[in-house]
Image: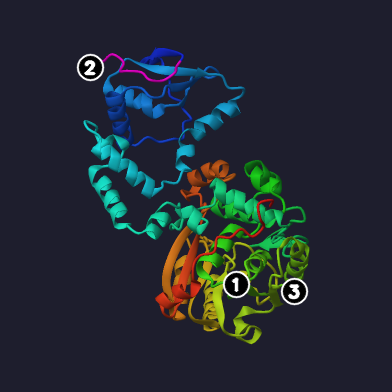
Amino acid sequence: MERKDSVKIFCAHDAMVGVEKIIPNPRNPNQHPEAQISLLARIIEAQGWRAPITVSNRSGFIVRGHGRLAAALRLGLTECPVDFQDYASEAEEWADLIADNRLAELAVMDEGALAGLLDELSQAEGFDPTLSGFSADLIEELLGKAEASDTPADRQEAGQSLAERFLALPFSVLDARMGPWQERKAVWKRLGIKSEIGRGNDGDRKTRGLTFSISSQPISAYRAKNELERDLGEKMTWEEFARLCPDEIKQLGTSIFDPVLCELAYRWFCPPAGRVLDPFAGGSVRGIVAAALGREYFGVDLSARQIEANRLNWSEVLSALPGCPPEPSWVAGNSVNIQNLAGRGYDFLFSCPPYVDLEKYSDNPDDLSNKPYPEFISLYRQIIQNAAALLAPDRFACFVVGEVRAKGGEYCNFVSDTVKAFLDAGLAYYNEAILISAAGSLVVRVGKQFSNSRKLGKTHQNVLIFCKGDMKKAVAALGEIDTAEIFGDDS
């Protein structure tokens, strides 16, 4: 391509630098697809340079502006405006490198305001509105939606972001790595939820013949270690695991069912003041969050010690909850017999079952985590059948599950078997969401894992939603989604 002189410049910068001297960062995690490069090239050609490329004085690499350099090369430019910046440390430079595109991703587009801007751009004489990054067809579609929203109530609703209306984006991907999600999770944890207490925090734990003390190890570390051993096909000591997975070792005592996911499940799919049935109660979090949101909770768990720990945790957090929340009920028992332990007429069936034998909870012969998969799934299906029978008509159920590998390394198909169990219990498969969690030390350990086995690093769980009865009536029973804050502004 023929080299060109630089285009107009409307930005502050330290110097104009030849493109051959501007070095991309070899650790740049931000990808720039063809469509983005083409759009950037069009914008630079039509409007000139609006922002310089940021280069680190420390390393000599680009920190921000990899896409702009690619666009300049596409246009055949010989030089680009560069802003040289000093970074106090390598960590500071890397943080800025990662933030380059991440900040824009965290923004939420207001379709109403966007449609107004695009309408004005379309009417501007001599200006191509597709330089906004939206195609002509998409602009027309957005303008059509804006015209259809012609009542004051519609316009007010359109002016609110989805996240404001529903506490989180109601998409089929729930990203627990996002800042607002993490901030909300921190508020719940400050309440004093100790869902990791009560099961497996003392004594010995076993998994397929391996016995080790976990008196100082949290359940999250145990599970990560078990997963890693299974993926690599070899055992390791806690010292070896700690070198590969320092994050899990650091996070002692913080392994809890995600309270934000729990809150969303209740607010989105359980009627106000509804009754919640949980056949695999485990720790305290689902009961405490239900109570904080005004729902009655009934949870069943095999471990009497776990039930006692849950009740103790409830007494510890009660004073931090406003008003007189309904006390959660936890009962020790086998959920195969749940119809004898719980009444009927529940408004929401919500649980997170054992992930087959990934984590062996106890030596109790009734414990599902002790069973080979065929026996596990048979009992699991029976529990779902019996629990679903206690759910009132025209109501929702939600199970949070994840795939588990069998001894040979293949998946057990646990997610699909869960769906089939609910279908056979007479419920309809209504929604599926993917909950994405932080990769943590997976970034470190997946290299050896993938190299040895080609097993992908797993950073998600499946959130499965089912409906019993008439779907429209079930939705109508939920009413408007309540987004009121539980703890006030000082939490």
Q: Dot 3 corresponds to which residue?
A: 304
Which tag is nearer the camera, tag 1 or tag 2? 2
Say which of 284 and 301 sits in front.
284
In the image, the segment drawn in magenta is 2-13
Say which amino acid is labelled 2: Glu
Label 2 crowd bin: few (<14), some (14–19), many (20+), radius 10 Å? few
Identify the disc placed on residue 241.
none
Mark 2 residue element: loop
In the image, 304 versus 184, the foreground residue is 184
Mark 1 lies on residue? 371
Q: Quadrant of residue 277?
A: bottom right
| The image quarter in which residue 171 lies | bottom left
Tell me the crowding category of disc 3: few under 14, some 14 to 19, or many 20 or more residues within 10 angstroms, Cα based: some
Disc 1 residue crowd, few under 14, some 14–19, many 20+, Cα 10 Å? some
Q: Quadrant of the N terminus?
A: top left
Quickly name the residue at label 2: 2
Q: Is residue 205 above or below residue 39?
A: below
Cβ atoms at labels 1 and 2 below 8 Å apart? no
Image coordinates for residue 432, horizontal then vertical, percent: 44, 63
Q: Position of residue 96 (x, y in %)?
A: 53, 30
- Amino acid type assigned to the residue bearing label 3 in the image: Ala
**In this rendering, would 392 be left or right of 197?**
left
- Magenta-span inclusion, residue 261: no
Q: Which circle, 2 or 3, is nearer the viewer?
A: 2
**Residue at position x 33%, y 41% in the image:** 117
